[in-house]
Structure formats: C-alpha cells, structure tokens
Amino acid sequence: MERQEAGTPPGGAAIRIAIVEDDPAMAAWLAGVIAPAEGLRVVATASTAAEGEALVAAGGYDVLLCDLGLPDGDGIALIRGSALRHPGADVMVVTMFAEQRRVIDCIRAGARGYLLKDMEPEACVAAIRDVRRGGSPISPAIARQVLRHIRPEPQAGDATLTDRERDVLNMLARGFSKKECAELLGLSVNTVGTHVKSIYVKLEVNSRAEAVFEASSQGILD
C-alpha cells in the first residue's frame, strides 16, 4: 500500500481518493486522470486485497475506487469494510465486467457508484464529484442489470451471436486488439470490425467494456 501527501487546492479541501486496483496500467490511468483535476487528490493506493484491508483500516479518504477481481481476495469485502468503518466516505466500483448478482451484491455492500473501465477521463472525474454531491454514478450497461433485477426481462442469450462473433467477443474480453483478433482468426481487420459492430447491436451496447459486461451477465463468454 502506498500513501501520498494530499495537497489542498485554493478555495477548499481536496476530495481525497484511494484506489484499490491490481492492474498497474489501470491504476496508473486512474491516478493520471485524477492528478490534474482541480480539487481531487489521490492519497493512497493498493494492488491486493490485503493491502486494501490496511488502506481501509487507515481511512483518510473521501472516495474509494475499488476493483472487484483482486489476486488474493474479493473487492466486495473491502466495500463492506469501508461502508462500516467510514460511512461518510463513498465507494465506487471500477470494473471490466461482472454478473448481475455481483452488481447487486456490491450495492448491498455499500457501493454508491459502479463504473466500467473504458470510461472517458472526463466521466471518471465527473463521477467522483457526483458521488460526493450525493449522486450514484453508474454506467448504462450496469444500470440495465439493476433494472433487470427489479424487473426481469427476457434475455437473448448467446444464440443471438454467430460462432465467429463469439470468437471475436471472447478475444476482445481477453484484451486483444481488433488487429490481433484479425491475425489470430485469419480475418481482415475490416471483417473483425464488422463483427464487433454486429455484437454491439445485438447486445445493445456501445463499447468493448459494455459488450464484455453484458456478455458475462448473459453467460456468453467462455
């Protein structure tokens, strides 16, 4: 766990942010987005559940950005611990994908926001400010999962995707680029792009992260 000095911007105290994220690239992205934003400061980071527990125990943050899939534990335990120890702090989940049950479990544990990792930098900063104002920022694809929990809707399932579309989707979920998908599947980049557009339309999503999230919730991914 790393703790950083939190400066105070002119005109008032900074929103102190702690990050629990095991992916170094994503952790660096979050810190890089927050650093130049006026009134926001990263005060602590952790990359494992064990480090996250120490971070939560120490407190000193206003917003906790927490990943779920940590190498040595479940982020939900950290969300619950933060909600109990520091009820005045806000917890936002930042994840790549999850099942409907996981979304509901996080909200029940005390999460007040739920974001997908492909968000724009401006959206990340806006979500942090929104949650401190009492809002509950949530990505559209995740909002649909919550609504389905309240009012279940028929789901198309993997039968709506062709075998090739499922191949492309599974590779996208593993982090391959369109070019890499094309090379590995023996297709042109344009053909892969066409499959991706079709996947987005069928799953009613607008980005890779939303497609992976939606496919995960429907049990489409291998």
Image (cartoon, grey):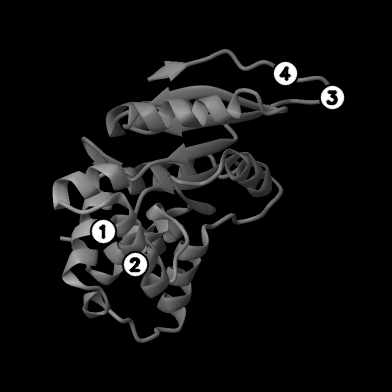
Which residue is the site of mark 1?
169
Q: Amino acid at mark 3?
A: Gly
Q: CA distance from mark 2 to mark 3?
A: 47 Å
Give the mark, 2 or 3, whose residue is nearer the N terminus. 3
**Which x, y percent locates residue 102?**
33, 60
Give the mark, 2 or 4, whose residue is nearer the N terminus. 4
At x 42%, y 77%, the residue is 148
Which residue is the site of mark 3?
11
Q: Horizontal placement of 34 versus 38: left or right? A: left
| Image quadrant containing the N terminus | top left
In this view, 143 is above or below 125: below
At x 56%, y 37%, the residue is 63
Mark 2 or 3, closer to the camera = 2
Q: CA distance from mark 2 to mark 1?
A: 8 Å
Say whether residue 122 is visible.
yes
In this view, 16 is above or below 86: above
Q: Residue furthest right?
A: 11
Give the mark, 1 or 3, whose residue is nearer the N terminus. 3
**Which x, y percent locates residue 149?**
41, 76
